[in-house]
Amino acid sequence: MSLPAKLESIVSDIESQFSIDDAYIVKATKFFLSSMEAGLAAPSSSREYMPMIPAYVTSIPTGKEKGLFLAADLGGTNFRVCSIDLKGDHTFELKQSKYRIPVEIMNAEESEELFSYLAKKVESFLEEHHADYHTKSKDHLKLGFTFSFPVNQTALDQGTLIRWTKGFNIPDTVDRDVVELLQANLVILGINVKVVALANDTVGTLLSRAYVNDPAKTKSNTIIGAIFGTGTNGAYYETIENIPKLTADKVPEGAKGMVINTEWGSFDNTLSILPNTKWDVTVDKETANPGYHLFEKRISGMFLGEILRVVLIDLFEQGHIFVDLAAERGGSLPHRVKEPWQLDAEILSYIEIDDSTDLQMSGLIMQNVLRLPTTKEERVLIQRITRAISHRAAYLSAIPLAAIASKVKDQYKDDDRDFEFGCDGSVVEFYPCFRDTILKAVAAIDPLKGTGKKIHLRIAKDGSGVGAALAASTVA
Ligand code: GLC
């Protein structure tokens, strides 16, 4: 549907500000590689390059791992507790409970409020699913703690929080060991569980996908564990000689390599190369970590809706949209539209593919979620901007995947299997066409050129819990 000339030129201008092309992603992939190298070399973290955090996991699962483990997964909106029975044949049995974390706890005054909440949930899970372990005094259960925030990890079971991301803000946790905090609160409750491994969700995703993957069948090696959900990040296996910051005393005996949690959300925090519209600037200012995780703020589920919302507010303030509506309401918009973070990426995913007459479905959704009545033209504008935002997000998402594939290709030079990326998270799983667009962009970068190998993107559902169990299984 065509728009009146003035609106058309406004929308086209916004689309061009969000647009990135193949030449850009090729260039950005090179820059990403140099930022990875800087992060692998620098002894302390800096805003300028990616954290590249050694995860103290020194091998990738083969699928033969066995045993019963617990996993506690704190990553975004939910806290999950699971028990995982690894069968040793690429399969497992999982029991899990999921708890939505109250906003007051995400913004608690003190860490203890959060960690005692988590410990209590572990307790309820055990009461429900493994009542015998709760009271038994011998044999503790081993727990892998998936903690999906930047952590300065110094051993498999030790790590201090660098900073909160994704809407959490409990300043008192920064620099404290999150394993100790969880363990202390489990001890207070008398729970017979030992936290033996700390893993980022991406590390978990890498391990769990590698466990499930049977290379004899898929003809592929699992190269990356990645999350595209509330946040975005990825982990991969790096050889020890390529991690100069890992001094000899920190290398576990016999280790040839180590999994690295890249924290790629923090790629290019100084904005040397990332696209930066005025709306990105506004969104960054609204967050608890301005100036950090700027790559994530252009890609992940927490931010896509917010970018759209601030574009709409801007157009409204310039008098281009919602004019009659505001006039009827004495000049203001419905309060939900004015409030940050009200527009979930899930809503964008419906608007993205709406093909109903006059985009009536989008109209109902905007009415329902934001209490916002829209005209046909406004809906067309909203859909086009939504598509521009999500296309940029998917295109940018290809950069780290392609960079890592090209960085590790020598590790696999003696083997002819394809590369697979294990991915989890609501955006990659559910956002329409997101996966296809990523793959198209990866193909444009062509990181495996000349090897004859293909790249597959596979969904590693709920991988982080299983992965934490696998990390726990490496402890004697
Ligand atoms: C954020 C966190 C990171 C996590 C990612 C995906 O970027 O900083 O640790 O892996 O979200 O959940």
Image (spheres, rainbow, N blue to C red):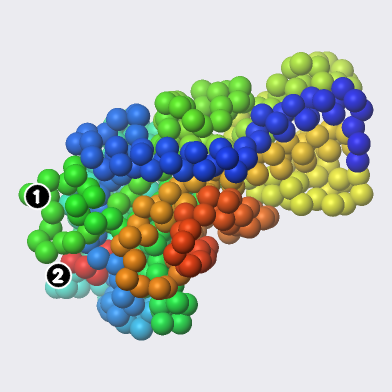
Q: Amino acid at mark 2?
A: Ala
**Callout 1, which amino acid?**
Ala
Quarter of the image for residue 88 reads: bottom left
x 43%, y 49%: residue: 403
> Is residue 184 found left or right of 70 in the rendered image?
left
Residue at mark 1: C-beta within 8 A of ligand 1: no
Q: Secondary structure at mark 2?
A: loop
Would you say residue 152 is visible in this rendering? yes
Q: Under tag 1, what secondary structure?
A: helix
Q: Which residue is at a point 47% across and 77% down the rendered structure image?
A: 218
x%, y% of residue 393? 59, 43
Quick one: label 1, few (<14), some, or many (20+) residues within 10 Å?
few
Q: Position of residue 358 (x, y in %)?
A: 91, 44
Which quadrant is home to the N terminus? Answer: top right
Give the residue furthest to the front: 450
Which residue is identified by label 1?
Answer: 248
Q: Is residue 240 above or below residue 319?
A: below
Q: Earlier in the sequence, mark 2 or mark 1?
A: 1
Above-or-below relation of 85 to 112? below
Q: Is residue 35 left or right of residue 365?
A: left
Residue 476 shows which numbered tag?
A: 2
* Crowd class of label 2 (few under 14; some 14 to 19; many from 20; radius 10 Å): few
Percent from the top left, x then y, of residue 123? 32, 61
The C terminus lies in quadrant: bottom left
Q: Nearer the viewer, mark 2 or mark 1?
A: 1
